[in-house]
């Protein structure tokens, strides 16, 4: 398993490699544009080449891009759909340029509308974004289940994959905090095994392609997405240990999106802590 962290590309996209290396990360995740703005960040050829060179010279073995939270791929509002499509397509094209492992996206929200229709709209948008890009996989992230968010159950993830064309470039990113918050018990090896068995029955084997390891401030089934530092929440150290030692996760990139002690993100000590949980 490649353990790492979400890091900032501020000051130049190659800075993400520098920051990840300083954390001892084997995998990194970035936003490819400001998470608070729709406007894409257009990286020049020189910046992308430097990123690739620095990455090749580092110990980092996987790069994930997280699509910004402004997207709602399931929206029925034409303007939101157009902006979501443009942003997601840009993320995938950046992924093509830097050889990213995947783009991770929250599937969207039905809000108060019909869930089946929202899934169909999201799937159509995924198909368009994939058709407008070349190689980078798209991973749909499971959600904590608040409101009308999609992807809160394995059946919903399966339906989203099918609606998106169910092709080889489509997969799933599992988030430990979201699993727990949406009611899946994962805090022991046996419980996690049962949960992943259920996941694979719904979405198919080999469709889990990336991971987020976060502790949860809120309890099992709370449906609230509140990340906590590893060992400081409801998942706990033993839950994190179970997660990183699940055999089916062994070859996957796993990034921390924890707040850190000062809200500035994961630390080198936390990355080392998680790496130390992996059985030899």
Image: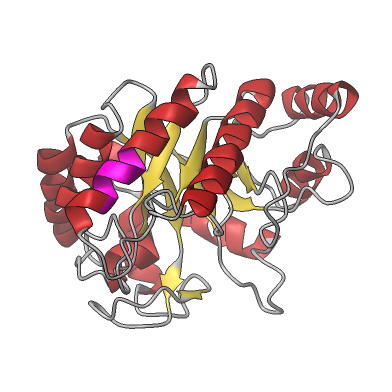
Which region of the structure is painted magenta? 118-123
Give yes or no for residue 10 being in the magenta stretch. Answer: no
Q: Magenta stretch mostly in which secondary structure?
A: helix
Chosen colour scheme: secondary structure
Q: Residue at x 44, y 28 (%)?
A: 128
Give yes or no for residue 119 being in the magenta stretch. Answer: yes
Q: Residue at x 38, y 67 (%)?
A: 177
Q: Is residue 258 left or right of residue 145?
A: right
In the picture, residue 123 is in which quadrant?
top left
> Which is nearer the eye, 37 or 199?
37
Count every numbered label the image shows and give the total. Answer: 0
Residue 182, image x and y in percent?
25, 69
> Which is nearer the eye, 193 or 212?
212
In the picture, residue 184 is in which quadrant?
bottom left
Q: Is residue 30 left or right of residue 141?
A: right
Can residue 234 be seen by looking at this rendering?
A: yes
Can residue 64 be seen by looking at this rendering?
A: no
Q: Is residue 102 left or right of residue 43?
A: left
> Which is nearer the eye, 24 or 17?
17
Q: Residue at x 79, y 29 (%)?
A: 51
Q: Residue at x 58, y 47 (%)?
A: 83
Residue 257, image x and y in percent?
55, 61
Residue 88, image x and y in percent?
55, 39
């Amino acid at each position: 398993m490649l353990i790492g962290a979400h890091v900032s590309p501020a000051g130049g996209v190659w800075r993400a490699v520098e920051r990840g290396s300083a954390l001892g990360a084997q995998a990194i995740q970035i936003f490819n544009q400001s998470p608070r703005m729709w406007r894409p960040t257009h990286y020049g050829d020189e910046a992308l080449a430097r990123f690739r060179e620095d990455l090749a010279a580092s110990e980092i073995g996987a790069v994930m891009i997280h699509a910004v939270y402004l997207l709602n791929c399931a929206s029925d509002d034409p303007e939101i759909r157009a902006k979501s499509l443009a942003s997601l397509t840009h993320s995938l094209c950046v992924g093509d340029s830097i050889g990213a492992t995947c783009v991770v996206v929250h599937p969207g929200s039905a809000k108060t509308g019909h869930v089946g229709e929202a899934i169909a709209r999201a799937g159509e948008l995924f198909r368009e974004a994939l058709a407008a890009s070349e190689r980078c996989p798209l991973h749909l992230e499971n959600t904590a289940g608040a409101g009308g968010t999609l992807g809160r159950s394995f059946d919903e993830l399966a339906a989203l994959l099918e609606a998106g064309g169910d092709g080889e470039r489509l997969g799933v990113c599992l988030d430990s905090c979201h699993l727990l918050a949406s009611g899946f018990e994962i805090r022991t090896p046996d419980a996690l095994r049962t949960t992943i068995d259920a996941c694979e029955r719904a979405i198919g084997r080999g469709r889990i392609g990336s991971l987020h390891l976060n502790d949860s401030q809120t309890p099992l089934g709370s449906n609230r997405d509140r990340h906590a530092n590893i060992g400081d929440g409801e998942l706990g150290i033993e839950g994190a240990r179970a997660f990183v030692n699940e055999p089916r996760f062994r070859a996957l990139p796993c990034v921390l999106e924890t707040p850190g002690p000062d809200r500035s993100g994961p630390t080198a000590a936390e990355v080392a802590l998680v790496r130390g949980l992996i059985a030899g």
